[in-house]
Image (spheres, rainbow, N blue to C red):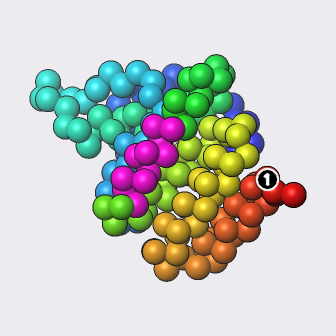
């Protein structure tokens, strides 16, 4: 993503968080602080907290992460995406694999696995063009055994 100017002030509660096409909210933020905002003094639901975390992640995509923290976040997102994939929530899986790839893990095998798994999620959703693109990217990222 090209760098964009930072917003002057982040809203206390996002108006809407992006949701995959199947209507499920993905809790795939790479951590961060979720204050749980919300209005009316009512308890914040898990979906609202998840949406808030995703919105916070989108507002701060260029944070500097130390290598140990990066690895743990990529692994957590990968496990979460794999759970979505096994549960048949392929849109959630594709979105979570995308968030893991956005962290730009330096391990070529991990990048290839993320692209391959996202390709499988796209294929399950009938998005054949995206599946083929991700399969090509996985092949390009995978180090070749010689």
- Say if 101 sits above or below 75 in the image: below
Residue located at (25% from left, 30% from top) = 38
- Say if 138 sits above or below 106 in the image: below
Q: Secondary structure at mark 1?
A: loop
Quarter residue 132 falls in = bottom right
Q: Which residue is mark 1?
A: 143
Quadrant where the C terminus sits is bottom right
Q: Is residue 116 visible?
A: yes
Residue 85 is situated, as x and y percent measured from the top left of the image, at 40, 61
Name the chief secondary structure element in magenta.
helix
Q: Please state which of residues 92 and 87 is positioned toward the viewer in this rendering.
A: 87
Q: Please state which of residues 85 and 33 is positioned toward the viewer in this rendering.
A: 85
Residue 89 is situated, as x and y percent measured from the top left of the image, at 35, 62
Left or right placement of residue 38 versus residue 79 in this view: left
Residue located at (64% from left, 20% from top) = 66
Residue 7 is situated, as x and y percent measured from the top left of the image, at 58, 28
What count of labels does the image hold? 1
Quadrant where the N terminus sits is top right
Residue located at (69% from left, 48% from top) = 109
- Say if 123 sits above or below 1 in the image: below
Q: Please state which of residues 31 and 40 is positioned toward the viewer in this rendering.
A: 31
Question: Per the image, is 17 magenta?
Answer: no
Per the rendered image, the range of residues in magenta is 75-85
Residue located at (67% from left, 38% from top) = 105
Q: Is residue 15 visible?
A: no
């Amino acid at each position: 993503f090209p760098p964009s100017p930072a917003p002057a002030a982040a809203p206390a509660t996002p108006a809407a968080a992006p949701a995959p096409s199947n209507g499920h909210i993905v809790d795939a933020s790479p951590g961060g602080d979720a204050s749980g905002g919300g209005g009316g003094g009512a308890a914040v639901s898990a979906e609202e907290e998840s949406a808030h975390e995703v919105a916070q992640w989108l507002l701060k995509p260029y944070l500097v992460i130390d290598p140990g923290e990066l690895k743990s976040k990529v692994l957590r997102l990968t496990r979460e995406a794999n759970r979505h994939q096994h549960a048949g929530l392929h849109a959630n899986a594709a979105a979570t694999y995308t968030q893991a790839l956005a962290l730009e893990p330096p391990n070529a095998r991990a990048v290839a696995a993320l692209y391959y798994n996202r390709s499988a999620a796209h294929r399950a959703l009938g998005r054949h063009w995206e599946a083929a693109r991700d399969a090509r990217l996985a092949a390009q990222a995978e180090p070749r055994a010689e």
